[in-house]
Amino acid sequence: MKLRTVFLLLILGAIAAFSALNWTAFTTQTSLSLGLSEIQAPLGVIMLGVVAFLTAFFLVFVVYVQASALFDSRRHAQELQLNRELADKAEASRFTELRSFLEVELQKLGSRGAGSSTAADPAIVLARLDRLEKELLSALEHSENSVAAYVGELEDRLERKDALPDQ
């Protein structure tokens, strides 16, 4: 049990014990004024009735608050579940849409690749290969010339360094 509930039960138990110990004083007749008239009644019993009524009223109020909180939480849980299902369906539809889009694009690429290979003329392909081979050879020759020039320059520097008298 919660500390709050234990505390309330202890207070109600203390009131019951106090009432039992002083029951003769509680049942003693007293003159009570109701504003327009006066009556003879036991004040202690009336006050115990008021405490019992307030206790019952607050218990009913607590039960009402707990029940409404429970119903609200159930309603929110159901709404959350519906929204979760809706999000899952939307995600699934996006995946299917993506899959169909990718299939269409792959078919386009496949047909484009197949179309280009059938449309390619062997003479054109051979001409392109010859041109690429000539370009590769000229780039290789240019690179060979550059390396030879650098090596020659390094040899000249080394010869000049050797030719200088030691100082």
Image (cartoon, helix red, strand yellow):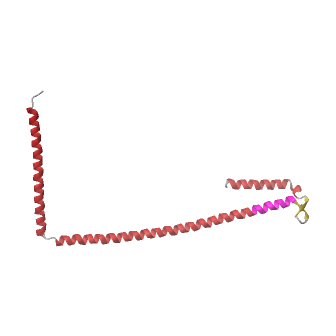
* Residue 15 x, y percent position in the rendering: 80, 55
Numbered marks: total: 0
* Residue 144 x, y percent position in the rendering: 10, 49
Judge left or right: residue 152 versus residue 59: left
Q: Is residue 114 above or below residue 62?
A: below
* Residue 81 x, y percent position in the rendering: 52, 67
Q: Nearer the viewer, residue 68 or 19?
A: 68
| Residue 44 located within the stretch drawn in magenta | yes
Residue 70 picture quarter: bottom right
* Quarter placement of the N terminus: bottom right
Q: Residue at x 83, y 55 (%)?
A: 19
Q: Nearer the viewer, residue 18 or 129?
A: 129
Q: Residue furthest top?
A: 167
| Residue 143 located within the stretch drawn in magenta | no
Q: Which residues are magenta?
A: 43-56
* Residue 121 x, y percent position in the rendering: 13, 71
* Quarter placement of the C terminus: top left
